[in-house]
Image (cartoon, rainbow, N blue to C red):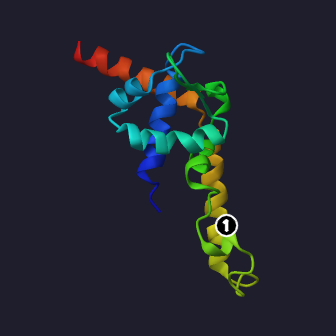
């Protein structure tokens, strides 16, 4: 399983928005420039984030985008699910009627456990945490090269 490019860019975009001063509206062109994404692709990425209540948009002159929630309230799981839907590792976890072997299939338990663990890990990491970690890494790299 590989996340889509849209999800990867969505995570990067939300981190970027979280790095801006609170309630500052960020222009679409600035997001495109800093995240190296085309305007059309950015629109595709932002639509599910807006629908999920993660990002807010402001229209008109001076319009743009900003986080709709505090970065500490947005998790990696929130972004993944906004872009790709509910996290499901196998068809048998999506539809209980998909496979008649669920009652005795030992692999079903593994899929279920792996999905649950993955969701918990993604839920543990907020955007605020990621912003802080990125800052620490950049500071470390600056000090190392200075």
Drawn side of residue 16 relative to residue 115, left or right: left
User: Quadrant location of the C terminus?
Assistant: top left
**Exactly how many numbered labels are in the figure?**
1
Which secondary structure lies at badge 1? Answer: helix
Q: Which residue is mark 1?
A: 112
The answer to whether residue 76 is seen in the rendering is no
Q: Position of residue 3 (x, y in %)?
A: 47, 54
User: x, y percentage for residue 77?
Assistant: 61, 45
Quadrant of the image occupied by residue 58: top right
Taking depth in this image into account, of 116 and 22 the one nearest to the observer is 22
In the drawing, does residue 118 fall left or right of residue 102?
left
Which residue occupies 64% across, 51% down?
119
Q: Residue furthest bottom?
A: 100
Provide residue 62's location: percent of width, then percent of height.
50, 16
Pick whichever, 46 or 70, lies toward us: 46
Q: Is residue 59 above or below residue 49?
A: above
Q: Examine the rendering and report whether any part of residue 101 can be seen.
A: yes
Q: Which residue occupies the foreground of this view, 37 or 140?
A: 37
Q: Residue at x 68, y 70 (%)?
A: 93
Q: Is residue 136 left or right of residue 74?
A: left
**Residue at coordinates 63% horizontally, 43% vertically from top-left?**
78
- Does residue 69 sit above or below 9 in this rendering? above
x then y, percent, for residue 105: 68, 83
Residue furthest out toward the left: 145
């Amino acid at each position: 399983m590989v996340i889509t490019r849209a999800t990867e860019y969505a995570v990067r975009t939300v981190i970027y928005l979280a790095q801006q001063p609170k309630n500052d509206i960020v222009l679409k062109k600035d997001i495109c420039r800093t995240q190296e994404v085309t305007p059309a692709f950015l629109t595709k990425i932002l639509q599910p984030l807006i629908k999920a209540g993660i990002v807010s948009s402001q229209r008109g002159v001076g319009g743009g985008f900003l986080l709709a929630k505090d970065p500490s309230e947005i998790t990696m799981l929130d972004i993944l699910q906004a872009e790709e839907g509910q996290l499901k590792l196998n068809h048998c976890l999506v539809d209980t009627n998909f496979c008649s072997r669920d009652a005795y299939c030992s692999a079903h338990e593994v899929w279920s456990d792996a999905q649950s663990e993955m969701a918990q890990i993604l839920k543990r990491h907020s955007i605020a945490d990621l912003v802080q970690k990125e800052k620490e890494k950049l500071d470390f790299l600056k000090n190392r090269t200075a």
